[in-house]
Image (cartoon, rainbow, N blue to C red):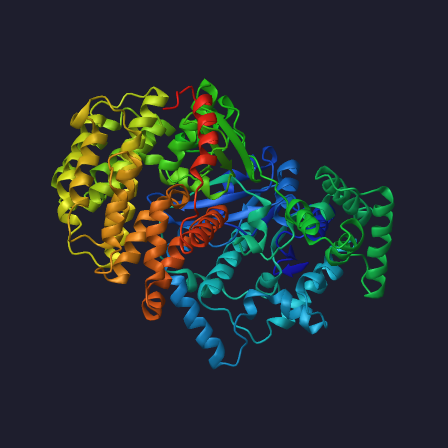
Amino acid sequence: MSILPGGTGVSVLGVRHHGPGSARAVRQELERLRPDAILIEGPPEADPLVTLAPELEPPVALLAHVPGAPTRAAFWPFAAFSPEWQAILYGTAAGIPVRFCDLPAAHSLAEDEERAEERDEERAEDEERGATPGLRADPIGSLAAAAGYDDPERWWEDVVEHRGDTPFEVIAEAMAAVREGYEPDGREARREAYMRKTLREALKQGYGRIAVICGAWHVPALTGPLPPAAKDNAILRGLPKVKAELTWVPWTYGRLASWSGYGAGITSPGWYHHLFGAPDRPVERWLTAAAAVLREEGLAVSSAHVIESVRLAHSLAALRGRPLAGLGEVTEAARAVLCEGDDLAVELIQRHMVVGDRLGQVTDGTPMVPLQRDLRDQQRRLRLKPEALDREIDLDLRKPLDLDRSHLLHRLGLLGVEWGTLGESRGKGTFRETWGLRWRPEHDLALIEQAALGTTVAGAAAQRAADLAATDRTALADLTSLVEQCLLADLPQALPEVLAALSARAALDTDVTHLMAALPAMVRAHRYGDVRGTSAEGLAAIVRSMLERICVGLPVAVTGLDDDAAAGLLKHVDAVQAAVALLETDGAGEASPRSRWLVTLRGVSDRQDLHGLIEGRLTRILLDAGELDDPGDRMARAMSRGQVPARAAAWVEGFLAGGGLLLVHDPRLLSLVDGWLTGLSGGQFTDVLPLLRRTFGGFAAPERRAIGERVRSAGSAGREGEQDVDGRRAAVAVATVLAILGKETG
């Protein structure tokens, strides 16, 4: 408690954000003080949102963002065990005004672009005056080190979280000692100046008992004699300002954990939630819950395991001089007894309990953009509940509900809301999809960023597709992928613009590799459109036009290629080959896309100036398609002694890229490869060995084994001469086989 001039009482409660012990102590202290106003560290623009807090389910966060500037946003997260959250709940329940007193988001967001440079300047100033850089960022760590602790989290647990009450006066004195000789500047000075300004305004309004809940580091700046108001006003004068909008959004415990990328200084939100919710016998309750988690995963954990692990945790705490077993002790006890030393089982407890997968909820009364409300309505209609944990769902697109779910997830993907990640379907056919779902808090920010595109998810996704199509920087392959996305998302209203842009871009693009890269997505889009019953008029015509231009340009594209260029073109050839196989053969002869493509490949494969890799691959494609009757002759020419060994090896690599079983089933081709290899000199074999390793290393182990056995059997037979066959004895067996086949012997 500090008494300001005039006998006014101001209580500044220094806390650590997201501390369960601090949260309980703040609630108890407020009930004792019975203040008539509460000030909380946070953006003052959120004052109108405070009344919504009792209806929310934490963890939640205040989101501040600048409309039209997606990178300028900030979050202020709250959990049930956050002292600030408990102060808000107390104030709203008691009818006490609750206000935020930190620097407004309108200023802090405007400063974001300048902060990196400012931090560098502050660090340099610290070093010049002999201060410890980074001290302001971790005062708890400084106090822990002074107390002889190497772990700030453990010190805070012992001193605060495991106590029945929080010694606010002691914390204030400790912070004053840490800040002795320290003069804040830059952003921190502005924040504390605004806190004091808000405190003065509350006093002027006649509030006699004011409680301030802020980070422990700021307590010395708000207690004792305050600096003159004019000095603080000078610090705040001329600050940059932007238009900021604020709302509540769901948050997750994963985002509270520092390892997940949000530096909130708390690595174990699930543990802190447990400490806040179970003040009596927390160790026993925690280890019982851990045993339940392991049992759900099929691990055998008995009551005896739980009892012994509790004993071990308490024994470890006593040996280490701790007032209560902390997270370290219960984790070691669980590892040794419940998990029997299995690190995977410990990781299971870590993921489900120490961090947790809790996702907060906001009510329909929370300010939202129309796009967010539409998504909430669709989530209810489609029974897709957003969750913080990873979840996998299988969709059967023949079912209306699953088809609508697929449309929604694809539409959100177009908007940059990656709630679902499309995986490899376990079922066969194009009517199944497998999605991995996980909701993240930043998805709400992405929806707000896209709010200007439309009021519904479908409308916004269609507008997003149209905007991408109208951009000159969109590559041809990206346009074809966009067509595919429109069909998967069921956005027929966007297709005409996208197809028109695609047709215009394809007509002007003279690079055949661009066309080859774009064709597979177009063919898939055409196929998915048929499977899903989505009309895509003009799509087939564009596919045929692109394929025709590819066929015309390919003979030129294969000329004069080095090894890297040949490898790159080969990927495009394989992709087009796979795409053409999906097209219906609605015509006969050269009229069908497949025939037109194969005729082109046949003409190119007969050229003498091809790179060995390309020639070998084209030969294999034509052979598999039944378009060649002389593969052995072609291989013999490619591997003749007149050819450079490196080119012959490249030819083999291209030819066998489709798999090595062909050598198992065709003795002549195997003999050609074997003869070519055995005819190489030692130096030549060393030169081509990397290519051969890459070629044969890509085969499955059974294929390599079968090829080796064929070579061994052929070698033992071929090099010793063919075995003599007794025609008289063989005639009996031949006659029997012919009789079985129903043929007469001649």
**Residue 559, position in %: x, y?**
15, 52
Front-most of 682 and 292? 682
Please indicate whether residue 615 sits to the left or right of residue 734 in the image. left
x 32%, y 35%: residue = 452
x and y, in percent, of residue 533 in the image: 34, 19
Can residue 427 be seen here? yes
Task: From this view, report whether residue 5 is shown above or below residue 92.
Answer: below
Relative depth, front residue between 277 and 554: 554
Q: Left or right? Give the position of 271 relative to 423.
A: right
Q: Position of residue 109 (x, y in %)?
A: 40, 53
570 left or right of 118? left
Can the viewer see residue 238 in this picture?
A: no
How many numbered marks does the figure carry?
0
Question: For residue 498, which quarter of the picture?
Answer: top left
The residue under the point 36% across, 22% down is 531
User: Does residue 375 appear to the left or right of 615 in the view shown?
Assistant: right
* Along the viewing direction, whichever of 256 and 731 lies nearer the viewer: 731
Q: Nearer the viewer, residue 706 or 719?
A: 719
**Is 666 rendered above or below residue 142?**
above
Q: Quadrant of the C terminus?
A: top left
Q: Position of residue 340 (x, y in %)?
A: 78, 52
**Residue 149 drawn above or below residue 743:** below
Q: Which quadrant would residue 529 be assigned to in this image? A: top left
Quadrant housing the N terminus = bottom right
Q: Residue at x 31, y 52 (%)?
A: 652
